[in-house]
Amino acid sequence: MIEETHRLLSAVAEDWKDPEHPARREAVGHTLRASNRFTEEAVAFAVNQQMELVTEAGLAEWLGTDPVGEPLHVGVIEAGNVPMAGLQDYLAVVGVGHRFVGAVSARSPWLLTAFAEEVEERGGPRALFADYEDIVEIVDALIASGTDETIQALGLACEEADILALLRGNKYSVAVLDGSESEDERLGLAEDALLHEGLGCRNVALIFAPDGLDADPYFEALSVFRGTFPAHPSTSGSLKMQQAFLAAVNAPHAYGEGLVYLVSRGDAEVQSPAHIRWVPYQDLAEVQAWITDHCGELQLVAARRAVSEKLVTSVETVVLGDAQRPTLDWTPDGRDTIGFLRGL
């Protein structure tokens, strides 16, 4: 039964690799008309990247092939910051044999729903979808991602309802440079920082760079990236006031034409999405100490392999350009989703 579910998931994913597949095309069209900051290019990237991973072999290796003893209704509250953000949790729940109950974000309610409906139409497990306000009352366990305030409220609700929960709070990512980055690595950094308008937990929000490093080649890479992945129209508006403030206080900063990105130089403080903070350092030991002190806030660290090998951290590390290309078994917030589901 589990192997058959994996086969169906893989078959639907194979069809969804085609941008003209009817279910995908319709869901993408609705998504791009919704009130979010998704662009056509970013949605295509997110869907394609994930569909390439969903194979029978990949699912079996990640999830195992032994079904859970007693199928339970597992609720999943999907984040709406990145296109199709809830797919991994959906695959995990149905792929081990539990029953999926989803609450999709109003910013992106079609992609995951359409994928799950197609799996059901082909004879796969049925996915239920419920309102956010009701989901705690109708499930046996809950998986959710959100702001720290949302997660705190959900934690209290789960305690009152006496249900087990895997809750993931707000995270961000950082990059560490040494000045030896190639052109391809600089372009990879641009993708890590700007794809999805900086809204994802895997987006690089802080760039640690050696003091005195010429930043112009890195800024050029940001502009080149925007030529392939144009900014959402709302991005420049959200950055305009911040850029005006930086100019008023004479703070060092740079921005792309039309304010498609904004970079400011200063302390390691996360700014708003698409506003990247460039943080100079004197010695890599400073960065190591900062990462150690803030590891609970970080999703990942992106760096050249030669740099990451010098950093000792429990935080996930990836090469520049891989932040937005997670593997099927990556662990959001460092939490073991499969262990949680099989332990219910």
Image (cartoon, rainbow, N blue to C red):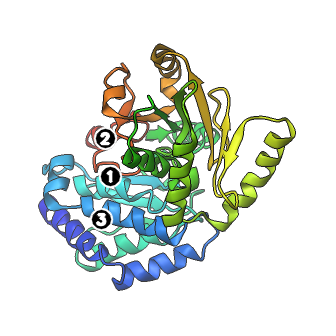
Residue 178's label in the rendered image is: none
Asked if residue 162 shows in the view, the reply is no
Q: Earlier in the sequence, mark 2 or mark 1?
A: 1
Q: Earlier in the sequence, mark 1 or mark 3?
A: 3
Position in image of residue 10 (x %, y %)? 21, 67
Residue 344's label in the rendered image is: 2
Position in image of residue 166 (x %, y %)? 43, 40
Using the rendered view, name the quadrant where residue 127 is placed: bottom left
Residue at 45 percent across and 83 percent down: it is 26
Q: Say which element carries label 2.
A: loop
User: Tag 2: residue type?
Assistant: Leu
Residue at 50 percent across and 72 percent down: it is 40
Q: Is residue 253 left or right of residue 154?
A: right
Estimate the spatial distance between the alpha carbons at disc 1 and disc 3, rounded to whole Å. 26 Å
> Of 1 and 177, which appears nearest the observer?
177
Q: Nearer the viewer, mark 1 or mark 3?
A: 3
Q: Residues within 10 Å of mark 3 (few under 14, many from 20)?
A: many
Q: Which residue is mark 1?
A: 72
Using the rendered view, name the quadrant where residue 247 is placed: top right
Q: Which residue is mark 3?
A: 51
User: Tag 3: residue type?
Assistant: Met
